[in-house]
Image (cartoon, rainbow, N blue to C red):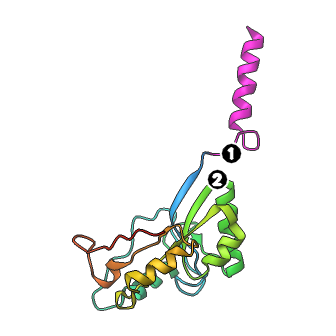
């Protein structure tokens, strides 16, 4: 009986103590930004660990000004502060992806750099321009997708132009 208890205890220890346990099951991050460190405003900026939601929209101010002010003044004790360089941002993101066994669907201005550094952990997504007036026509999109660089569509930001997704005439295309 003592041997069984010892074996069960050892098994429990080996499967729960960091370093002895297996890597966590895979996670897919469907909204990963390959961005610049200062895209949310100049450092220092951060977010509260007890984030209860985004700031209230103020109609007399551009949303980006309200958001940048909120990021520059995180509430609460010990906020999570943003990296202060592109190098630090890339290194921290890749370390978290590897440690937590995360695969990221990525888009943004530094997607090629993140993909090169993160290899199989990064799946590049094509993101249409934020300004809907600059969207390419379906044939141009088809050509971009046929290159094979992108595996999925990235963030479609119609809401920032005041357009709802309900009833929006998405054009689905067969590629290849």
Residue at image point 52% right, 82% down: 40
**Mark pair 1, 2: CA separation:** 7 Å
Image location (x, y in percent) of residue 172:
35, 70
Location of residue 8 with respect to 76 vertically, above or below: above
Mark 1: few/some/many CA within 10 Å (<14, 14-19, 20+):
few
Q: Position of residue 43 (x, y in %)?
A: 60, 84
Residue 28 x, y percent position in the rendering: 54, 56
The part of the image, by quadrant, that contains residue 12 is top right
Start-end of magenta stretch: 1-24
Q: Which residue occupies the extreme top position in the image?
A: 1
Front residue of 116/99: it is 116
Q: Residue most toward the front?
A: 176
User: Looking at the image, is mark 1 or mark 2 earlier in the sequence?
Assistant: 1
Position of the N terminus, as image quadrant, is top right
Which residue occupies 39% across, 67% down? 53
Residue at position x 31%, y 80% in the image: 57
Instruction: Tell which of 123 and 150 is nearer to you.
Output: 150
Q: Quadrant of residue 82?
A: bottom right
Q: Residues within 10 Å of mark 2 (few under 14, many from 20)?
A: some
* 8 lies left or right of 124: right
User: What residue does disc 1 label?
Assistant: 23
On screen, residue 57 above or below 166: below
Callout 2 secondary element? loop
Q: Is residue 60 magenta?
A: no
**Mark 1: secondary structure:** loop
Check if mark 1's residue and mark 2's residue have beta carbons within 8 Å.
Answer: yes
**What residue is shown with label 2?**
101
- Give how far across and how far down residue 74 sits, in percent: 50, 74
Q: Which secondary structure dominates the residues rendered in magenta?
A: helix
Is residue 128 among the parts visible in the rendering? no
């Amino acid at each position: 009986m003592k041997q069984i208890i010892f074996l069960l205890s050892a098994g429990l220890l080996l499967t729960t103590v960091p370093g002895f346990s297996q890597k966590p099951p895979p996670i897919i991050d469907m909204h990963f930004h390959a961005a610049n460190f200062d895209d949310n405003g100049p450092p220092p900026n951060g977010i509260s660990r007890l984030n209860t939601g985004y700031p209230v929209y103020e109609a007399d101010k551009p949303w980006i000004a309200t958001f940048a002010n909120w990021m520059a003044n995180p509430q609460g004790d010990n906020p999570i502060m943003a990296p202060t360089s592109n190098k630090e941002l890339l290194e921290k993101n890749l370390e978290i992806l590897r440690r937590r066994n995360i695969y990221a669907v990525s888009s943004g201005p530094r997607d090629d750099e993140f993909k090169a550094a993160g290899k199989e952990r990064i799946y590049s997504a094509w993101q249409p321009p934020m300004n809907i007036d600059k969207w390419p026509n379906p044939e141009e999109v088809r050509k971009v997708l046929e290159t094979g660089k992108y595996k999925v569509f990235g963030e479609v930001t119609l809401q920032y132009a005041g357009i709802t997704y309900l009833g929006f005439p998405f054009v689905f295309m067969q590629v290849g």
